[in-house]
Structures are given as C-alpha cells and as structure tokens.
Image (cartoon, rainbow, N blue to C red):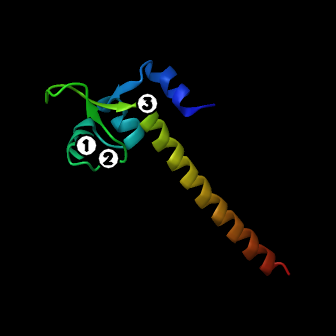
Amino acid sequence: MNTVFLLMAEFETATIPLSDIAERYLGMKPATAEQKASLGLLPLPTFRCNDSQKSPRMVHVSDLATLIDTKRKESKDAMDYVSRKNRTKNKAVHQ
C-alpha cells in the first residue's frame, strides 16, 4: 500500500496541521515541533497557508509519507545488515 494514500485516508486532507502529527510521527509535543519548525530543525518542511503568524503551520501529506518511508528503509537496511553480520558470525562459529 502507498503511504500517501494511507495518510490521506487517516487525515482526509493533503495538508495536515503540524500539531496533529507532532506526537505520533515526530515524538514531540506540538509546542516543541512548532519551535523546531521555526528554526528549520524538523526532518520535513512545514508551511503556513498565508503570511499570518496566527495561521497554523502545516505539513504536506507527501512530505510526511516520504519521511515515514525513508525512516522505514533506513531501519530495514540496518536490520538486514545486522542479520547478515550475525549469520556470518554464526556460520564461522559452527564450522
């Protein structure tokens, strides 16, 4: 399944308020996510739909999907590396 489509089903929109994803996907309180976004320290881009500071900071669903897919691939690659290393080590021990 495509991550973008799953996120679209979950949020029912292409633009998601940063506060709605902060805890679940970024592991931080919305206020912390807001501060990091203003400093450019989040792992995904954020934007406001207009120039008002009162306008909520948003994340595009495709950017969140890219982050999720990238982190999943990094984790899978690390797990595959460790598994290969362990198999090689076990093979040497049992010879």
Q: Nearer the viewer, residue 79 or 62?
A: 62
Residue corresponding to mark 2: 42
| Quarter of the figure that contains the N terminus | top right
Residue located at (41% from left, 39% from top)? 25
Q: In the orientation shown, which residue stands out farthest toward the left?
A: 53
Q: Is residue 36 left or right of residue 63?
A: left
Q: Is residue 37 left or right of residue 1?
A: left
Residue type, label 1 = Ala
Q: Nearer the viewer, residue 54 or 22?
A: 54
Estimate the x, y position of residue 92 in percent, counting from the top left: 79, 80
Residue located at (25% from left, 43% from top)? 37
Is there CB contact under 8 Å for labels 2 and 1?
A: yes
Residue corresponding to mark 3: 61
Estimate the x, y position of residue 56 in percent, counting from the top left: 23, 27
Estimate the x, y position of residue 87 in percent, counting from the top left: 75, 69
**Rendered position, 17 above or below 74:** above
Residue located at (25% from left, 48% from top)? 40
Total count of labels: 3
Q: Which element carries disc 2, helix, strand or loop?
A: loop
Q: Looking at the image, tell me whether mark 2 or mark 3 is earlier in sequence order.
A: 2
Q: CA distance from mark 2 to mark 1?
A: 6 Å
Residue located at (75% from left, 73% from top)? 88
